[in-house]
Image (tube, helix red, strand yellow):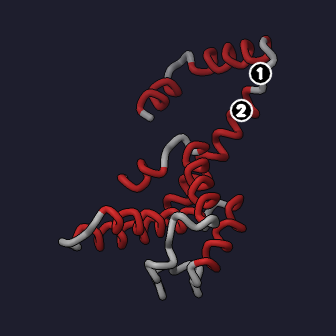
Amino acid sequence: ETTVTAARASPHWLDLVTAVHAVSSAVGSDLDGIWNTLEKGRMEWLGAVTAAHPLKVILKEALNKDKNKTERDEVDMKMVYIYALSLSIESLANESEAWRKVVKMKNKANPLQDYNVDLWDPRKEEWRPLDLGVQEAAERGGSSFQAAWDA
């Protein structure tokens, strides 16, 4: 971010942009289309991360307070976070709804209400498309699920 800010402040920024566009056109590349796709993916991911952040804070606080936590507990918490992220990713509307039904979630905006650990099984076939969809959204946004969880 610092590098981009400094580059944009340079008196030669517009010359650089013009030159890059000229090369792009010369090789038949749709630079603007590529950039718009990347920007859309970034905005989608940032929106999902922002919307799911309050729940992530609750989940991580619970993990940090649990003196007897297991690796499975962290997997369970990450699953809830993945579901929460999916709610803000338009292309995953069907997948998140299917998962909500599998785990018998009454309020899609509150996955912890009536949470039943036995139903949140990552081996269920409905989980894979939701999990992979969130990971792909993170990649489109220039990030990863793990980076969002760790932040």
* Amino acid identity at mark 2: Ile
Residue extending farthest left? 67
Task: Please tell me which residue is depicted at 42% across the width and 50% down the height of the picture.
Answer: 146
Q: Are marks 2 and 1 in contact (CB under 8 Å)?
A: yes
Q: Is residue 142 above or below residue 130?
A: above
Pinpoint residue 76: horizontal percent, then vertical percent.
41, 68
Q: Is residue 39 above or below residue 98?
A: above
Q: Which mark is residue 29?
A: 1
* Amino acid identity at mark 1: Ser
Residue at disc 2, secondary structure = helix
Q: Which mark is residue 134?
A: none
Q: Which mark is residue 34?
A: 2
Marked residue nearer the N-terminal end (2 or 1): 1
Task: Please tell me which residue is depicted at 56% across the width and 16% down the height of the picture.
Answer: 12
Query: Is 120 or 31 nearer to us in this picture?
Result: 120
Pinpoint residue 118: horizontal percent, then vertical percent.
46, 79
